[in-house]
Structures are given as C-alpha cells and as structure tokens.
Amino acid sequence: MNARSQTRAGTRPPRKILFVIEKLTARSGGAERVLIETANALAARGHMVEIASHEFRHGTPFYPLAPGVIAVNLRPPRRGLRRIVGRARDLWHKVMPDLPPFDLLTWVSRNGGFWRRLQAYIRATEPDVTIAFMPPATTALALAEPGHKMRRVTSTHNAPVQDFHNPVRWDPSRLDRRRRLRLMGKMDRIAVLLPEYRDFYSAALQARALVLPNAVPQIAPEVLAASPRRKTVMAVGRLATVKRHDLLIEAWAKIAPDFPDWDLRIYGEGPLKADLAARIAQYGLTNAHLMGHQTNVAECYLEASILAHPAEFEGFPLAVTEALASGLPVVGFEDCSGLNRLVKDGETGILVAADGDRLAQYSAALAGLMRDPTRIRQMGAAGPASMAAYAPDAVIDLWEEMLFDADVPRGGLAG
Amino acid sequence: MTPALDVLLPHYRDPAGLKLSLSSIAAQTWGGRMRVIIVDDGSPEPDRIEAEEVAQEFARTSGIDMLFLVNAQNLGRPKTRNRLLDAVEADHVTWLDAGDIWYPEKLEVQFNHLSRLRMAGVDIDRIWVTGAYDWQQVGSTSARTLQQQVQGDQVLELLDGGNLRAYLWTLLGTARAFRIAGRFDERLPRLQDLDYFLHFVRGGGKLVVPEDNRPLCRYFKSDIGRNAREVHACHKLILAKMQPVIQTQPPALRSKLHYKANRLAARFAKSNGNRLLAANYLAQAAFGSPRHTLRVFKSVLTGKASRA
C-alpha cells in the first residue's frame, strides 16, 4: 500500500486536500459534479481528500463519493433558537437597503458564519491545500486565516463576467461584488476554464491563473461505432432561465411538423420544469419530453443524434463536452461563452448567429441539420477527437501540478 | 512472492514486549503467507540491537518473513505508523503493538469472517474486522473481556468510546480498506488511533465483528509515562476536527464528549502521580460540562443507593 506508488508519477507524497463549496447536498449541477469527480480522482491517487460545504440542508451529495473522500457540512442545523435567529436574519437581509453601513452588516450576517467556521475547520485539520469552488466559497477561503502554511486555490466555473459583475448571481449586494474580485488577490492559484477567461483578470492575478478545463470522459471508438442512433434531439441541463429551454421548445414547435419521426428529449430538473411542461402542452407537442434527471445520461448521448444547447452563457459546459465526446453534433449560439470555444462551427456543430431573430435562426439551423444525416454523421465523427485533450488523466495531472508544484504551470491544457 | 498479509508492528524501547508479541504471531493457527514489518522508532542502541535480535530469532524459528526497519531518531508513533503503511505490499493488513498479544485463533477467525462477507457479496474493501479483546491493567493478574459493539452510528460510538474503541491491534482488513483511513495525523502523539478510525468510518468504511465473540487478543494497559497534557491536547484537537459532526448532535452528547476528554486526561494525570493536574482536569470536566457532570453524579448516587 505504498502511498507514494498510488500517484501516477510515483513521486508525489500524499497530501491533505480540502475542497470547499457553499452547497453540495443533493445538488446535481455541473460544478458539483466536477468537484466530486476531481476529489475522487485525487483520492484514487493516494491523497487524503475532504469536501466542506456550508448549508442548512444536511444530507449526502448527489454524486457518489469514492472510498476515503469525506464530505462535511460546517453549518449547524437550523434548529431551536438557531431557527428563530435565522428567520430574523433572512428578514433583515430582505429589508435592509444596499447602502452603507447596512450593507456591511448584511454582508457579515450573510457571509461571516461561513468564513469563521471554515477558518476553524482549516485550523483543526491543517490541509496542505484548500480549493474553493465558486464565489461564496472563494470569499470564505480568502478571509480565513489558516494558522499554518497552506496553498489557497480558487476554481472558477463560469465566465468571469458572470461571477463578478452579474448583479443577480451569488450575493446580490454591491459590496459583495466589489469584495469578490478584490479577494481573488488572496488566492495563490486561480483556475479558469478557458484561456480567454484568464484575460479578464489584472496582470498580477493572471500570473497566478491557470487554464484548467473540466475533465471529459473519453468514449472508446468501438463503443461509438456500435451505438444505435435514433432520430432524437436531446438537451441536457438544469431547467433554469439561462439554459433557454423555452426557446428550444418554441423552435421545436416550429419545426416538429416537418419531422414527425423525430423527438426532443430534455434531461434535467430545475425551477422552470412546470413552466416548460406547460409550454409543451400549450403547443401540443407529443414528441417533446421532459425526461427529468437520469443517472444514465451518458448512455442517452450514445442513442441520440443531435445536442441542442441554446444557453445564453456557459463556463465550460459539461453537456456540450460529453455530447462531443459521444459523437453528437451540437447546435448552440455563437455568443454563448464556453460553448463557442468548444464547438467548431461547421466541423463539430453549428454556432447560430446571435444577431437578429434568435428563435428563427436557431429553428432553421436545427432543422437544416436534422434534414442532413450525412452532415450529422460527419460532424458527430469529428467530435470525439476534439475532446481528446480533456481526457481525465491529463486534467488530473494538471490539477496536481496546480495544487502542489512551486511554479504556476503556464497555459494548462487549453492555453 | 507477495505475502497475503502484512503485520505492522511499531516498536520503541521494549524488546521483551516485542518478543511476547512475536511469539503470539508465530502461534497463529491461520496458515496463509504473512510478513511481519517492524519499525523501531529510534530506540536507544541497546534496546534496538536486542529488538533486532528478537526479530531475527522470530523469523528464523517461525519461518515467517520479517522486515526490520529503523528510524534514525525517535519520530513518535504516528510517523512510525505511517512508515509502516508505506511498507505495505500485501493484500491484507493487520496491526500489533509491541507488548500486546493475539490469541492463536485471531487471524483465522477474522479471515474466515472476511471470506463469509465476500461470499455474501459484501464489498470487503470497505470493511475492517475488529473483535472482542481482553483488557489487562499492567500489574494486575486479571483481565476483563470487552466486546466491540458495532451497531449504531460508528462515528459517535467511537467518539463516545464506551461500546466501540479504536484499537488497531484488533483489526484485520484489506490493504484497500486501510487506504480509506488515509494516514495517521502526525500532530497527534496520542490518540492517533481514534483519529484514524474516525477517518475510516467518515470515509465510507465500516467496522464489523465476527459472529464468534470470544476475545481475540489481549491488551496490556498502562497509563504510566503518558503525558496527561499531551493526551488532553490530542483529544481536544480530535474534537475540533469532529466539530462539524458533533454540532449536529444533541447538547447532552456534546457535553458528554467534552467531559470525557477532561476525565481521560485526569486519569492519566492521576496515574502518573500528578494529583493537582488531575484535579484541574476534573474541575474543567465539572464546570465545562455541567450537564454531563450532573448526570454522572446522579448515576453515582443512584448506584450507591441501589448497592445500599
């Protein structure tokens, strides 16, 4: 059981790694999946890995943890007096104006517990490296004083403009948006998903930034060759506004009469489920289905013909990468960050023009591809090779370099 | 040829205890191929030389493979145990401390139980087999048998320590199962076993006991020479690491755990003749955990009343 021999290179001693994310219990999002898959892979290489969350809901993560990976929730349950105080604080957060000095009080009320408890836990466990996923955890990690030598890393999972300037994401206060970016200066490493995301940061921060894409499971060629493709257009993602499933359903309503032997399957759960179901019913679409969350979605990619992904913006969309690796052409918008980097227009999919009537243009592009099985096959065949650079082993090698090596590895896989 | 079992045995300044332990290994009824790995933790040279002679004699007379490693200086038990983990090559792992002994059927009973679990479709790479043991205070002639109760929440049971105790020498498991526990926390000169067990269970591992509940080993317990302050600090650190788990529990349990940390330190202080320090820890137990102290008083009074 020589611990050193478990690491790929055979040279890295086992380290203590702490991942931090605000919410993990039962969450099936892309960032949560990347976090757990990375944690599992690092544990398989002999490292001691823990994942700390800070949430009221106490339960198990949606994605399975590998043996040895510990998930811990730092937030006490909201019971008794905590429940009463918590409700009073929720009310406070709603009614207080976003102006000094109320904004500072509200900010401390919202974020103080996270960084205080994280600091206590870091001091007790003394990890060699702590990695924050997404802005709330990054803020908590930046403010925590470890009391020992520790590398601080943040792993970003969106286009930076969404993480730092979008007023409706994360803590909506202006104070938090200002602090979020300033506190990035406390990070020793900043992982970004794509090279252009690194350009967002100042020169000082760029020196610590590394392009670290998500790992994409590779599909064996014989599996791809043996996959029976149906006339199915699929979409995968949380049923939320940003994914624009509403636009996809409207597009489908326009083109479905011309394609009676095709169906549309939308995989995922989310707050818009009822609204989307109502739209499908309103248009009388018998060949459009909300599939809910499927644990075997990897197999679904192998049975479909096209991935429709009309999202407004993305970080490094897992659904797109998995579809490309599974031999599916992808139809998305040219201004969708992340997607427009991964999909090569005309080669592995179609990037629909963003200007003009988006619905009409998207409908036309999708229908055009559905009519052309040769193009579907050609684009589908080009997809897997375009994802080869994101093979899990290569990405985990890069993670280890970022977490443990003295120098910032410049560029990363996609840099 | 790779052994089926690596026996991990740390040693420090106790060649006579090492001899006792190795004799109990040689007497095992389990017939598989095993290797004993001993790490001497920087004992003074006469002790180290004598221990090595004892180990060589054991290897020669028993025919069991043996590896004797030496720390150039005294590094403490957690680092020594981590060095032992680094040396593992076998598919199965077990532990023994110099001075403690296994009964002859220990390995056979535990291997049989692992086989039964495997046949039943259990993932034995997440299992540690523990078992009952005899507990004998050094200097006493009698021992008492303690059962390991593995029902319930094993994290809480290990923290409580009443029904399930973290003793490495009771264990047998696959090398993969031991990977779940990671490595020993080198900041814990004492109680690192408890921390290691907790990591195993929190990491998805499970402790089981054989159906045959006869004692499998004998632990010779001594508090002498163990620094109460060190024990107390280690206990506090473990409770701090476990704070996210403990805070989800009812106040009565939280009070009990903090009471026990102080009581344990008081016991070590008293055993080593430092009554003032023992009183200090007892006072911390009483004032820091008044809820549990009252319960203890109540049970003591009730016990006295019933005896009367």
Image (spheres, coloured by chain):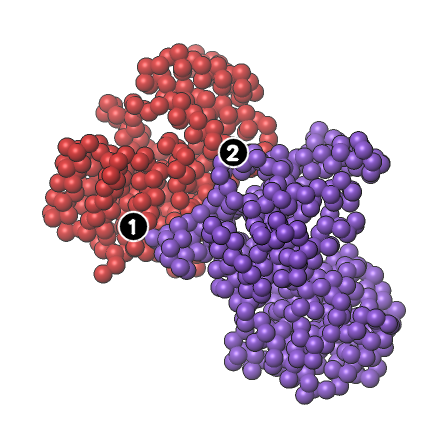
Chain colours: A purple, B red
Distance from disc 2 to disc 1, alpha carbons, whole Å, reads 32 Å
In this picture, is A343 found above or below B49? Answer: below
Residue type, label 2: Gly
Residue displayed at 14% across by 51% down: B63
Quarter of the image with the C terminus of chain A is bottom right
Mark 1: give few (<14), some (14-19) or many (20+) Cα within 10 Å.
some
Local secondary structure at mark 1:
loop
Neighbours of disc 2 within 10 Å: few (<14), some (14-19), many (20+): few
Q: Is residue B155 left or right of residue A21?
A: left
Query: Residue A146 at what x, y percent from top left?
Result: 54, 36
The one nearer the camera, A66 or B62, is: A66
Q: Are marks 2 and 1 in contact (CB under 8 Å)?
A: no
- Within the image, what quadrant is residue A72 found in? top right
SS label for mark 2? loop
Can you say whether A199 is above or below A24 in the image? below
What chain does mark 2 sit on? A
Q: Residue at x 77, y 83 (%)?
A: A368
Label 2 belongs to which residue?
A147
How far across and how far down the image is residue B112, in percent? 32, 53
Label 1 marks which chain's residue? B
For badge 1, the amino acid type reads Ala
Question: What residue appears at the point 19 percent right and 41 percent down from the top-left corner?
Answer: B22
Q: Which residue is mark 1?
A: B87
The image shows residue A253 at horizontal and vertical percentages of 84, 75
